[in-house]
Image (spheres, rainbow, N blue to C red):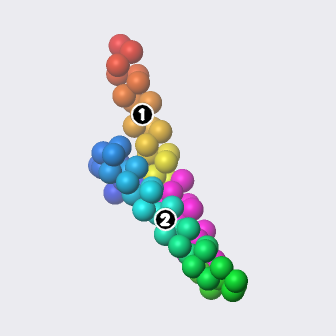
Amino acid sequence: MKEYINKTVADLKALVAEKREAIRKIRFGNAGTASKNVREISDLKKEVARIETVITAKSKVVATESSK
């Protein structure tokens, strides 16, 4: 999580898109077969949630600063 705090919101959004694309590729790559990467999908989803949390926190800080 610490590595995400120093990045810009645009970088974080690009990272989220990249992670979501990786999830999509894993889920639909072997459409008819059972996936062997169940743990990897779970880890990627958690990482996306962490990045989204940092984006939300940064946007709240910007909103608070601009309202002053």
Q: Is residue 65 left or right of residue 26?
A: left
User: From which residue to which does the magenta span run?
Assistant: 38-49
Please state which of the two labelled residues, at mark 2 or mark 1, is closer to the viewer.
2
Could you say whether the residue bearing mark 2 is in a helix, strand or loop?
A: helix
Residue at x 61%, y 73% (from the top left corner): 27
Residue at x 34%, y 57% (from the top left corner): 3
Question: Residue 62: where, in percent of width, then height?
Answer: 36, 28
Residue at x 37%, y 54% (from the top left corner): 14
Q: Tell whether position 44 is magenta.
A: yes
Could you say whether the residue bearing mark 1 is in a helix, strand or loop?
A: helix
> What secondary structure is the stretch in magenta mostly built from?
helix
Can see residue 53? yes
Q: Is residue 65 left or right of residue 44?
A: left
Can see residue 39? no
Q: Residues under labels 2 and 1: Cα distance? A: 24 Å
The residue under label 1 is: 59
Amino acid type, callout 1: Ser
